[in-house]
Amino acid sequence: MTTSPDTPAVPAPALVTAETLRDEIAAALTAARDRTATLTDCVESGDLIRQHSPLMSPLVWDLAHIANQEEMWLLRAVGGQDPIHPEIDPLYDAFEHPRSERPTLPLLAPGEARGYAADVRGRVLDLLERVSFSGRRLVTGGFAFGMIVQHEQQHDETMLITHQLRQGAPVLTAPPPAVAPADALSLPAEVLVPGGPFTMGTSTEPWALDNERTAHTVAVAPFYIDTTPVTNAAYQAFIADGGYDDPRFWTADGWDHRQQAGLTGPMTWRRDGGQWLHTAFGVTEPVPPAEPVLHVCWYEADAYARWAGRRLPTEAEWEKAARFDPVTGRSRRFPWGDEAPTPERANLGQAYLRPAPAGSYPDGAAPCGARQLMGDVWEWTSSDFWPYPGFEAWPYREYSEVFFGPEYKVLRGGSFAVSPSVARSTFRNWDYPIRRQIFAGFRTARPAAPEVS
Ligand SMILES: [Fe+2]
């Protein structure tokens, strides 16, 4: 792999006026806070304080942690202001206290957390009015503000996972995805992605995080990839064929985990007589056959792929399928082009609280013809989480660098729970191969014979 500059996918920061950038940042901060309020105002105080799963923080921790990070990076680091409540910093340091420990901490009460978040936000909007976006790397292109917008939106996804794991009556509702009828039945099952080099990662996306950088050239052999994510119907066939009972389909670690954890199907599924039911945000219904499978761990995705005679795509293959335009030879910001996501192109932003049927969003198709590479479900790849060539931890080691290694698998593409502020085809997510609470599914791939010239 060699490093190379990529084609600017968004206007260079210098071409965006400071006033436009201020307006965009203010709108993005407000959108994030509106979502945070929706996720935390819909439950009583007791539900905010309670830990709904040892895998998750109490919602009230997320709320004050969002504000604390915003204070530290924008008011203190950018604005040079003194801490508002320095004594609470350790409580909301994610590295000081694992999630399982957070309910035992003397956290701010719900009213105090809301007041703190509102106080910080008011001061941040004042700062935004007068900040200069030049001279310091931390503010170039509005980076620190973009990082905080993304941080809050990522916690909004985390809080939605908490809601998914919460027991009790439903408190969140959303309509079914408003998508045109899918022509999934007429779509090819797989599409060919040509071999050859492409540009992976970015050096120009202003709000890209450190692990997405730098842009570099990667050669990928030709391969086929599923046109859509794997559906619930296809996954049911894997189960019905004994996929969970045959160690040949599983890695050794995966089989050990499947046995120890007693896995028999996706996290939210249970068998009811002759059918599978699933529960989503407190509502139980028959598993929708056409929707992408959700809440499966990497081991399950990998076993399914082997059962199907295929494999998971590598991270580079996934990104090439999602971004590479063979006509221009350049990598796009999104599968459909460089323009921002719209409701017609991708299921993002917690608008529907479920993935759309496989084959939806023809307007969001990639040049190779694959659909739903942005939104709907995170997609497991076969790749471990490693830095790109030229990686530099920025602006702090704990964002990415401390996680690099073979313990984590990379996920791509974003889910229905991901904000458009975070969704882009270079964004990298990572998690342990046993994790199922995240909004993750997958698609499969297979090598293609090289073209003979
Ligand atoms: Fe955080």
Image (tube, grey):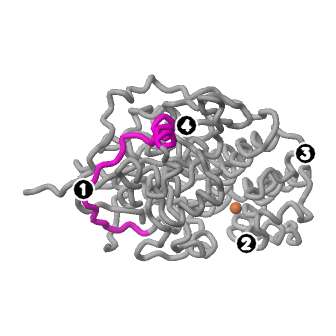
Quarter for ligand 1? bottom right
Q: Decide if ligand 1 comes within 8 Å of the CB at mark 2.
A: no
Which part of the image, by quadrant, shows the N terminus? bottom left
**Which span is picked out in magenta?**
214-241
Q: Decide if ligand 1 comes within 8 Å of the CB at mark 4.
A: no
| Residue 359 visible (yes or no) | yes
**Few, some or many residues within 10 Å of mark 3 (<14, 14–19, 20+):** some
Q: Cβ–Cβ below 8 Å for labels 3 and 2? A: no
Distance Cα–Cα, label 3 vs label 1: 54 Å
The residue pinned by badge 4 equals 355
The residue pinned by badge 1 equals 222
| In-front residue for pair 19/278 | 278
Q: Secondary structure at mark 2?
A: loop
Q: Earlier in the sequence, mark 3 or mark 1?
A: 3
Magenta span includes 228: yes
* Mark 1 residue type: Pro
Q: Is residue 366 left or right of residue 19?
A: left
Distance Cα–Cα, label 4 vs label 1: 29 Å
Q: Position of residue 146 (x, y in %)?
A: 60, 57
* Mark 3 residue type: Ser
Q: Earlier in the sequence, mark 1 or mark 2?
A: 2
